[in-house]
Image: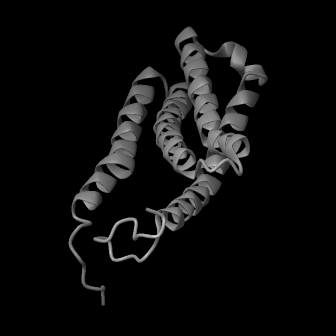
Amino acid sequence: MDGMDADPDDGRDETLTERLDRNWNALLQELRVVQTGTQLLTGFLLTVAFQQTFRGLADWQRTLYLVVVALAVLSTICALMPVALHRALFRRGAMAELVTWADRMVRLGMALTGLAVVGAVALIFGVAAGPAASVAAAVVGAFLVGSIWVALPVRLRRGAGAPHAPSA
């Protein structure tokens, strides 16, 4: 199959190996953004517990904080997993497995990052303005993440099959 076009219907003349290399490179570009964001969020959250005002948080705020930290740490682990997997599979002829699992981890990491961002916003609003503001911020944040990170890409993906005329 390596000498044949990987998908003759997509308009690209590439082998399966070339397609896997292209997909891996695209994932790496995405990971550069995701890794930085998840690491910054996690680092910020890890410092909160060492602030003097942390002792004054209500029990629900402390619980929310711990949930958000766990989500942020898990998202960071997912964002770093493709690098660890690449090291383990380097020069083993396992590019298909690498791309498949990296894609899965990036998707899971993005979902966890979205939840962590919503939780962090809820925590900040809760500390600054109370429980009602916390819930409102969480609802708005979840709506925005769901709309922009899930619904919009799904909508665009469904319409991606038809060729589009260039914009003026």
Q: Residue 21 placed where, x, y %?
A: 57, 63
Q: Quadrant of residue 69?
A: top right
Where is residue 52 shown, x and y percent of the image?
Answer: 78, 21
Is 48 or 131 nearer to us in this picture? 48
Number of numbered discs present?
0
Is residue 78 in view from this perspective? yes
User: Which residue lies at the image location 39% right of the left edge and 76% below the top edge?
Assistant: 12
Q: Can residue 40 be seen from the camera position used here? A: no
Image quarter in which the N terminus is found: bottom left
The image quarter containing residue 56 is top right
126 w.r.t. 6: above or below: above
Determine the residue located farthest toward the top in the rendered image: 59
Q: Position of residue 30 (x, y in %)?
A: 56, 57
| Quadrant housing the C terminus | bottom left
Q: Is residue 90 left or right of residue 107?
A: right
Along the line of sight, which residue is nearer the eye, 148 or 54?
148
In this image, 22 relative to 148: left or right?
Answer: right
| Residue beneath the point at 60% across and 15% down | 62
Please, is residue 156 above or below residue 50 in the view?
Answer: below
Colour mode of the rendering: one colour
Q: Residue at x 29, y 49 (%)?
A: 151
Picture coordinates of residue 26 (x, y %)?
Answer: 54, 62
**Residue 114 vertical placement versus 49 (above, below):** below
Q: Residue at x 30, y 85 (%)?
A: 167
